[in-house]
Image (tube, helix red, strand yellow):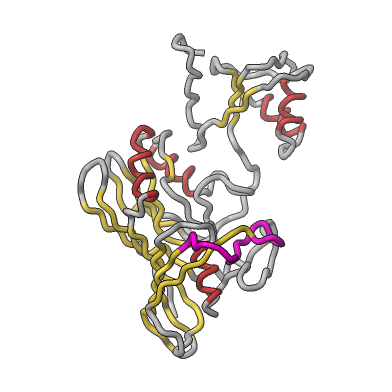
């Protein structure tokens, strides 16, 4: 503990900030017993290896020992790690950076934060490694399958002002998507519906009866043969909103493995050669800290 009573901040390791686990009331003979039981997603032998290598820290910053006593109220710090991360096909790029904000352009399949088999290759860890900024934090999320722009705050005390822009719908986001061309549809149009978790597949969303909680403006940019490029402008930000709204119009986005039909489970391997044709193309807002009008565009393009 620091003299003020606060937990000391642990340094990053290769772009990964320390995670913390607190010991609740209970009985564990040793620290290794507690970690193995508390977080069984990591094997006991792997916890033993991490403790051996000094990858679990006490609040003092000193390495924790596998067989030290484990008491309620103690906190331990550890670093997420995956031994063999599957390779990803693309690289992220920094579009803009100042003292307050960083805007990144991520490829398809790259998670924004550590997820599943990806730690070092997730966007956040890559940017922390690049900038050395431990306080970097994503201000919003886009699906791993979606490519395009992600905003990051650089100062923790400034996060709420940026989050307020999203809460108050003061950020204008534009997406591009490739789907079937349906010339009989009248576009542009605004699609609204109530979205809820799918009762069969927890990883999907579906439209249900009730007051709408999601809204998207959909316009046709251009068509070629039986395919078309669409512009999507979400007012709300529900999970999978754009994918569900497009499907509801008979315009399932190309490369979608979940809508309208589940082609693979959420933990099953995916075909990296067939990405979801959805791109977070642009974002526009007034920066709450500088007062400047901001307009950013992805350097990526979807092709017909």
Task: Give the camera-side residue of 198 and 304.
Answer: 198
Pinpoint residue 3: horizontal percent, then vertical percent: 46, 9
User: Does 241 appear above or below 11?
Assistant: below
Residue 42 vertical placement versus 277 (above, below): above
Residue found at x 46% / y 57%: 237
Main SS of residues in magenta:
loop
The residues colored magenta run 198-214
Residue extending farthest top:
3
Q: Is residue 246 left or right of residue 297?
A: right
Seen at 44% across and 57% down, the residue is 106
Viewed as shown, does residue 170 lie left or right of 5?
Answer: left
In the image shown, does 20 or 83 lie closer to the viewer? 20
Residue 279 covered by magenta stretch? no
> Residue 4's spot in the image, x, y percent?
44, 11
Which residue: 68% across, 22% down? Answer: 24
Give 22 or 233, whichever is nearer the viewer.
Answer: 233
- Residue 248 higher or lower than 86, as above or below: below
- Residue under the point 25% across and 41% down: 289
Residue 5: x and y in percent read 48, 12
């Amino acid at each position: 503990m620091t003299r003020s009573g606060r937990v000391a901040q642990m340094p990053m390791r290769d772009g990964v900030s320390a995670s913390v686990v607190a010991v609740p009331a209970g009985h564990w003979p040793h620290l290794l017993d507690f970690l193995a039981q508390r977080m069984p997603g990591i094997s006991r032998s792997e916890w033993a290896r991490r403790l051996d290598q000094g990858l679990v820290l006490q609040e003092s910053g000193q390495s924790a020992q596998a067989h030290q006593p484990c008491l309620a109220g103690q906190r331990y710090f550890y670093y997420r790690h995956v031994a063999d991360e599957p390779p990803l096909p693309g690289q992220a790029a920094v579009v803009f950076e100042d003292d307050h904000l960083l805007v990144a352009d991520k490829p398809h399949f790259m998670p924004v934060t550590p997820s599943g088999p990806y730690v070092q290759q997730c966007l956040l860890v890559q940017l922390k490694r690049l900038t050395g900024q431990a306080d970097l934090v994503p201000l919003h999320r886009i699906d791993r399958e979606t490519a395009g722009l992600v905003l990051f705050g650089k100062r923790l005390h400034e996060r709420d002002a940026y989050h307020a822009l999203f809460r108050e719908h003061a950020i204008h986001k534009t997406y591009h998507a490739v789907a079937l061309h349906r010339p009989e549809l009248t576009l542009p149009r605004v699609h609204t519906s109530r979205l809820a978790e799918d009762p069969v597949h927890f990883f999907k969303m579906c439209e249900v009866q009730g007051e709408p909680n999601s809204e998207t403006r959909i316009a046709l940019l251009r068509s070629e043969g039986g395919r078309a490029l669409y512009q999507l402008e979400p007012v709300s930000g529900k999970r999978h909103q754009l994918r569900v709204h497009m499907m509801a119009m008979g315009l399932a986005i190309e490369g979608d493995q979940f809508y309208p039909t589940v082609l693979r489970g959420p933990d099953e391997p995916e075909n990296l050669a067939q990405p979801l044709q959805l791109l977070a193309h642009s974002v526009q807002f007034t920066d709450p800290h500088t007062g400047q009008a901001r307009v950013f565009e992805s350097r990526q393009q979807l092709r017909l």
